[in-house]
Image: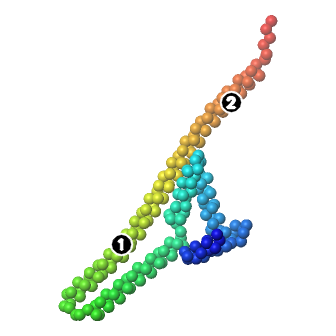
């Protein structure tokens, strides 16, 4: 079984890193992940196993795809910039090589060709930007939905606490009335009837 796992890791380009057993400090990322999951899961009461499983799935989706990863975003931005510049450089080389090998035509057609090449290049670059903006909008919508669910949960908790406070006030009032009744009975001298 372990061999199959190692083969799978190798096939997927994953390097297996082992940490020191029973030493959480060397297991930092996974321990932080477990703590984050535990904190999120303990916020709710689950009455069915399916509810817990769904909550875990939502957390894993958020943790892997929605939450802010500073290093991964920096890398993605850097890779995206390198990719855009590489594409741009390739297209410039392509335009130059086409221009150099193409037979000369009147000056007006060269200008139109350059304008159309620049236009198509700008469309591709702006298309990438639009895609990134759409992705960000989707992430923000997921975050909004999660915050709305959290707000509803907090509101339910507040209503529950308000009901507890009202019941506590009634209990205190009843206890106070009972104490004052017993106090007045104790202060009155006993009546002896003849």
Residue 175: mark in rendering? 2
Q: Nearer the viewer, residue 160 or 173?
A: 160
Q: Is residue 93 above or below residue 183?
A: below
In the image: residue 21, left or right of residue 114: right
Name the residue rendered at 61%, 56% in the picture: 39
Question: Residue 21, image x and y in percent?
Answer: 72, 69
Question: Residue 111, image x and y in percent?
Answer: 23, 86
Q: How many marks?
A: 2
Residue found farthest to the top: 194
| Helix, strand or loop status at disc 2 | helix
First of labels 2, 1 by sequence position:
1
Label 2: few (<14), some (14–19) or many (≥20) C-alpha neighbours in 10 Å: few
Q: Is residue 17 above or below residue 50?
A: below
Give the foreground label among 2 and 1: 1
Name the residue rendered at 65%, 71% in the picture: 2
Question: Residue 73, image x and y in percent?
Answer: 50, 72
Q: Nearer the viewer, residue 174 or 181?
A: 174
| Helix, strand or loop status at disc 1 | helix
Residue 9: mark in rendering? none
Q: Whole-Å distance between the Cαs marked 2 and 1?
A: 71 Å
Q: Nearer the viewer, residue 102 or 184?
A: 102
The image quadrant of residue 166 is top right
Label 1: few (<14), some (14–19) or many (≥20) C-alpha neighbours in 10 Å: few
Q: Is residue 181 above or below residue 53?
A: above
The image quadrant of residue 105 is bottom left
Residue on which the image places disc 1: 127
Name the residue rendered at 35%, 88% in the picture: 93
Whether pointer 2 and pointer 1 mark residues with C-beta atoms closer than 8 Å, the reply is no
In the image: residue 61, left or right of residue 32: left
Q: Is residue 175 above or below residue 38?
A: above
- Identify the image quadrant of the N terminus: bottom right
Name the residue rendered at 56%, 54% in the picture: 53
């Amino acid at each position: 079984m372990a061999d199959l796992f190692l083969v799978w890791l190798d096939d997927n380009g994953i390097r297996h890193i082992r940490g020191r057993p029973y030493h959480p400090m060397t297991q930092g990322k996974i321990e932080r992940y477990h703590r984050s999951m535990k904190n999120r899961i303990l916020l709710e009461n689950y009455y069915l196993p399916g509810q817990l499983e769904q909550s875990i799935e939502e957390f894993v989706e958020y943790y892997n795809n929605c939450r802010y990863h500073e290093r991964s975003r920096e890398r993605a931005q850097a890779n995206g910039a390198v990719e855009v510049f590489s594409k741009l450089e390739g297209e410039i080389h392509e335009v130059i090589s086409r221009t150099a090998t193409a037979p000369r035509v009147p000056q007006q057609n060269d200008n139109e060709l350059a304008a159309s090449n620049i236009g198509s290049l700008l469309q591709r670059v702006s298309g990438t930007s639009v895609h990134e903006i759409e992705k960000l909008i989707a992430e923000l919508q997921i975050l909004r939905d999660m915050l709305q669910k959290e707000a509803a949960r907090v509101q339910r908790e507040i209503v529950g606490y308000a009901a507890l406070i009202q019941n506590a006030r009634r209990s205190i009032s009843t206890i106070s009335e009972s104490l004052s009744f017993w106090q007045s009975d104790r202060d009155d001298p006993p009546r002896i009837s003849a």
